[in-house]
Image (spheres, grey):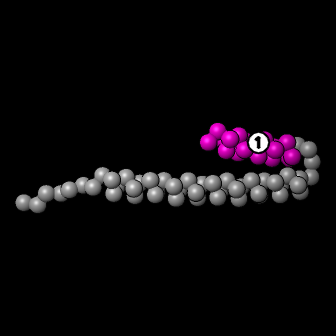
Amino acid sequence: MTTLVFDYQKEAKKVRAEYRRKLRELRQRQKEALSNLYAAYYFAENEEERATIEAKILAILDDQRKE
């Protein structure tokens, strides 16, 4: 009979690497979203649009500060 040996340290290393990869992807998407929102803010035609976009920008920046 074979005994399965589970290497917890090896598995933990894989999980941490996957977490870091996903976190890096999330931060990249946030940067892209901010860039797009800044461009939209710049080209907004009226103050109502700018206020909406500004609220979204501030929400993203607030989330980043909390990390």
Left or right, 2 with reference to 12: left
Q: Which residue is mark 1?
A: 58
Give the residue furthest to the right: 46
Q: Position of residue 42 (x, y in %)?
A: 88, 55
Mark 1 crowd level (few <14, some 14–19, many ≥20, 10 Å Cα): few
Residue lying at 48% horizontally and 53% vertically, measured from the top left: 19
Quarter holding the C terminus?
top right
Q: Position of residue 35 (x, y in %)?
A: 76, 57
What amino acid is at disc 1? Answer: Leu
Q: Position of residue 36 (x, y in %)?
A: 77, 58
Quarter holding the N terminus?
bottom left
Instruction: Report the magenta stretch's main SS.
Output: helix
Give the residue furthest to the left: 1
Task: Give the structural element (helix, strand or loop) at label 1.
Answer: helix
Count of picture labels: 1
Q: Which residues are magenta?
A: 49-67
Q: Is residue 62 magenta?
A: yes
Give the residue furthest to the front: 9
Left or right, 7 with reference to 55: left
Q: Tell which of 17 and 45 is nearer to you.
A: 17
Q: Tell which of 23 and 48 is nearer to you.
A: 23
- Relative to 59, does residue 22 appear above or below in the rendering? below
Q: Position of residue 57 (x, y in %)?
A: 76, 46
Residue lying at 46% horizontally and 57% vertically, measured from the top left: 18
Q: Is residue 45 magenta?
A: no
Q: Tell which of 46 and 23 is nearer to you.
A: 23
